[in-house]
Amino acid sequence: MGLHKHWNLNMNLGFFASHGGSNMQAIIDATKAGKLKARPALLISNNRNSQATARAEQEGMPFQVMNSVTHADSDALDQAMLDALREHQIDLIILAGYMKKIGPKVLAAYEGRILNIHPALLPKFGGQGMFGQHVHRAVLEAGETVTGVTIHLVNDHYDEGRILAQSEVPVLPGDSVESLAARVLVREHQFFVETLAKIAEGELQL
């Protein structure tokens, strides 16, 4: 589904996050600064004690905690998430460090409108189990001199959806997992905002 100019200015963003939600915060900050014409409208988290839910509370953004405790049945959980997204009229879903798979109902309803960010240049260093520090460790062990950030659409396979945008980040001599992770995260925050701005302005078609 293409994004068209007539509703871009009121693009409602829904976030899924499990832990820190720093990418979500960077996007919220960009909307407040006028760098991104979109409205952060909902957070869904599987973790009530996550920093992401604290951030949403602080920003006055609606949030809902949904997981296997709140919904023992996975179909019911999937449907509840879809109902929440529809209730808040979400146009685009942003995965900001969400550690669960998206259910089939949400995937079908939002096909081509779910974005994930990955801390490497896919298809390298992607797939199940490749998240966070695991990615940066693998990059260093492979002796790469360049890594980066990938923003891609989400399908029912980890890290295999269509790539929308990529940005390179240098691997420096003497990098540790922590130093590389920190450098990539800085670029993630910038690049997610830059890419969403292109979508909102109609420069990048989904």
Image (cartoon, rainbow, N blue to C red):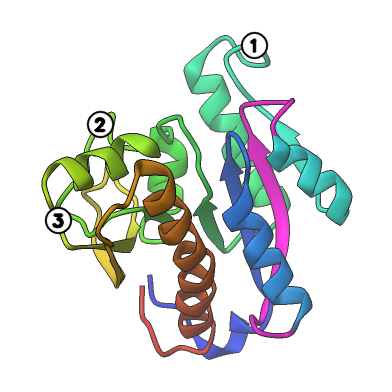
What residue is rendered at 40% in x and 32% in y? Answer: 101
| Residue where numbered disc 1 is placed | 69
Amino acid type, callout 1: Val
State how far apart marks 3 and 2 are (Cα).
20 Å
> Dot 3 corresponds to which residue?
144
Q: Is residue 168 above or below residue 36?
A: above
Going by the numbered disc 3, the residue's amino acid type is Glu
Q: CA distance from mark 3 to mark 1?
A: 41 Å
Q: Amino acid at mark 2?
A: Gln
Bounds of the magenta span?
A: 34-50
Q: Are marks 2 and 1 in contact (CB under 8 Å)?
A: no
Determine if residue 25 is in view.
yes
Let me know if residue 91 is in the magenta part.
no
Q: Residue at x 15, y 53 (%)?
A: 123
In the image, which disc is placed on residue 47?
Answer: none
Give coordinates of residue 66: x percent, y percent. Answer: 65, 26
Please report the residue visible at 45 percent of the width from the left and 67 percent of the height from the top. 187
